Image (cartoon, rainbow, N blue to C red):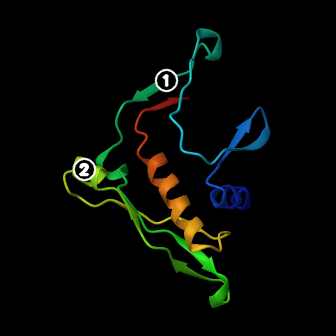
Amino acid sequence: AQIARDVASAMGARVIDIGGRIRMAGGAAQTPVMTLADKDLVADAVLVFSSRLGFDELVNRVEASFVNPADLYNPITAPAVEDAAYLAADGGAEHVATPNFRFETSVERAQRLSSLYLEDARRQAKLKAT
């Protein structure tokens, strides 16, 4: 499972389980859209909706690592990706995420993946069914 997540992170994708089949959902930042009807829910499922992430879950700066072929594939840190608007919205408090793109070998792609990671981390509305 961890290898699938690492491969997905190198593509900016996500591993999803659809009825027992493992798939990777695309790596482009998109506005999530989903319509749920009564038939989609289990009768006794508990639904929890949160419109905002907790302050400790926010991300406004990404400092990712990737493997560098010129350095014998040792992990190094890519230039940070941050968003001033997100920093201002968070009251100036810096919230750093440090993903490890261990299957990525290019600094440019590591930065692009960091941008996707940042945009995905800022999606705040969550619906959880248990």
Query: In the rendered view of the protein, which quadrant contains the N terminus?
Result: bottom right
Q: Earlier in the sequence, mark 2 or mark 1?
A: 1
Front-most of residues 20 and 63 = 63
Q: Which residue is denoted by mark 1 in the rendering?
A: 47
- CA–CA distance in space, label 2 to label 1: 27 Å
Position of residue 128 relative to residue 107, above or below, is above
Secondary structure, mark 2, is loop
- Residue 74 sits in which quadrant? bottom right
Position of residue 84 relative to residue 102, above or below, is above
Secondary structure, mark 1, is strand
Q: Residue furthest right?
A: 21
Q: Are marks 2 and 1 in contact (CB under 8 Å)?
A: no
Front-most of residues 72 and 84 = 84
Front-most of residues 3 and 35 = 35
Q: Residue furthest top?
A: 38
Q: Residue 16, image x and y in percent?
A: 68, 42
Q: Which of the numbered marks, if any, corresponds to residue 90?
A: 2
**Left or right position of 115 against 43:** left
